[in-house]
Amino acid sequence: SPVGARGRNRTVVQERLPAVISFIRIDSRLIHGQVIETWLPHLKIQRIVVADDASVSDPLVRTAMGLAVPPDVEVVIARIDDLPFKKLENDGVRTLVLLRDVDSALRAYERGLVGPLNLGNVHSGPNRTAVSRTVFLTDTERARLLAMSRDGLAVTLQTVPNEPARPLQAA
């Protein structure tokens, strides 16, 4: 089950409220200064959901993430397969979902995550090509994201809120 960064189980379940997953972002750094200082206030976020299998099993990472976030913002860190995306979408809490990489995002969408996808920061590495100054994709990742985009998912590149979002297809 989802684990709160401050050590509490934090699954919130309320039904029939407007969908409020406000933003879904791939950012290899997950919770960090740019997210906290720009995206949280811009989107008026009340909860951050870190959908990341590796972070769940690392108490130091969980603690650091929890301490980095303002105390009035709930933090949920959970394995992708353990997250109730439909409940998160409908529980009335303005939520930012953070994913570490493209594979994690694809898994989350397969498990029911719904909404536009922001590519904020995907680290460079072997066999990765720059599609923006902060996003580097393999050919396979790009092809899979473009296929999802053709199927109706908005996939955009945007590092910070004051920069215009660009569709992946234009990169």
Image (cartoon, rainbow, N blue to C red):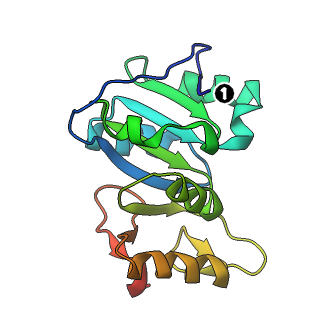
Could you say which is closer to the camera, residue 142 or residue 64?
142
Q: Position of residue 46 (x, y in %)?
A: 34, 29
Image position of 131 with respect to 112: above or below = below
Residue, disc 1: 62
Image position of 126 with respect to 106: above or below = below
Q: Which quarter of the picture shows residue 125? A: bottom right
Q: Which quarter of the picture shows residue 43? A: top left
Q: Position of residue 163 (x, y in %)?
A: 31, 64
Residue at left offset 69%, top offset 78%:
128
Residue at left offset 45%, top offset 42%:
85
Residue at left offset 77%, top offset 31%:
57
* Amino acid type at image mark 1: Arg
Could you say which is closer to the camera, residue 166 or residue 55?
55
Q: Position of residue 28 (x, y in %)?
A: 62, 54
Could you say which is closer to the camera, residue 138 or residue 88?
88
> Is residue 2 found left or right of 157 in the rendered image?
right
**10 Å neighbourhood of mark 1: few (<14), some, or many (≥20)?**
many
Q: Position of residue 78 (x, y in %)?
A: 61, 34
